[in-house]
Amino acid sequence: MGVSLHERFKGNAVHNLAHMQELLRILQWFDKASISAIPYKGPVLAASVYKNLALREFFDLDILVNVADVTHAAELLAANGYRCQTRLSEPQLRSYLSSGCELCFERDGVAVELHWRIAPRMYSLPFTFSELWARRKTLCFGEQTIATLSPEDTLLVLCVHAMMDGDGGTGARYGRGTRAFAWSLVGR
């Protein structure tokens, strides 16, 4: 017999709380190192749209930083046991920073995507970190306040990710998240 819906819900709640705790820990590391960071999607979307971390599945932590801080942020993650999934030399990293958008890290089953852009440069999106940072909002988790994208930027980012992932099977998931987020805006 399969896992009951109640057991799956409880398992998802435990998973999401553990990931949220890890996100808060990472953001504290970045804050102590004077790295401005904006987490988005995942637990931030669950908290802002559903008001409950357990009501949305997510599998990684997406954190946006300024391109100038990527190397330092990556070093902090590595110093705390995270392994980068891509090995790049210094010249390769410089080149990748100009065209790519993320580095993926993993530790103990927690995946972290360190972003410096919302999408690869080939999409020609007009988002810059400084503009997103200037429009940021905040969310409180316990005693910790974190930056998050503005509602308008969140909606655009969700649409971009639904478009990029449309052929990869996750587009429908982003479509549902985008729809739920848009409805949450109407209700505010």
Image (cartoon, rainbow, N blue to C red):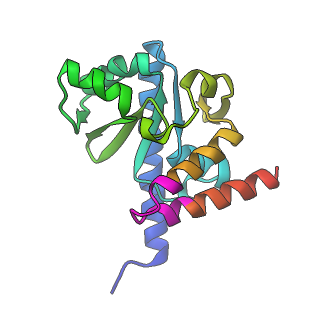
> Residue 91 appears in which quarter of the rendering?
top left
Tell me, yes or no, whether the highlighted magenta stretch contains residue 170: yes
Instruction: Give the percent coordinates (x, y) of residue 123.
Output: 48, 42
Looking at the picture, tell me which residue is in the foreground, 89 or 80. 89
- For the point 66% across and 22% down, the residue is 134
- For the point 47% across and 48% down, the residue is 17
Q: State whether residue 178 is above or below residue 100.
A: below
- Residue 89 appears anywhere in the view: yes
Give the residue furthest to the bottom: 1
Quarter of the image for the N terminus: give it.
bottom left
Tell me, yes or no, whether the highlighted magenta stretch contains residue 127: no
Q: State whether residue 51 is above or below residue 121.
A: below
Q: State whether residue 182 is above or below residue 1.
A: above
- Residue 120 appears anywhere in the view: no
Span shown in magenta = 162-174
The reply, left or right, for residue 159 in relation to residue 73 is right
The reply, left or right, for residue 56 in relation to residue 51 is left
- For the point 44% across and 69% down, the residue is 8
Q: How many marks?
A: 0
Looking at the picture, tell me which residue is in the foreground, 135 or 111. 135
Instruction: Give the percent coordinates (x, y) of residue 43.
Output: 52, 46
- For the point 21% across and 18% down, the residue is 90
Instruction: Give the percent coordinates (x, y) of residue 95.
Output: 29, 24
Instruction: Give the percent coordinates (x, y) of residue 171.
Output: 49, 62
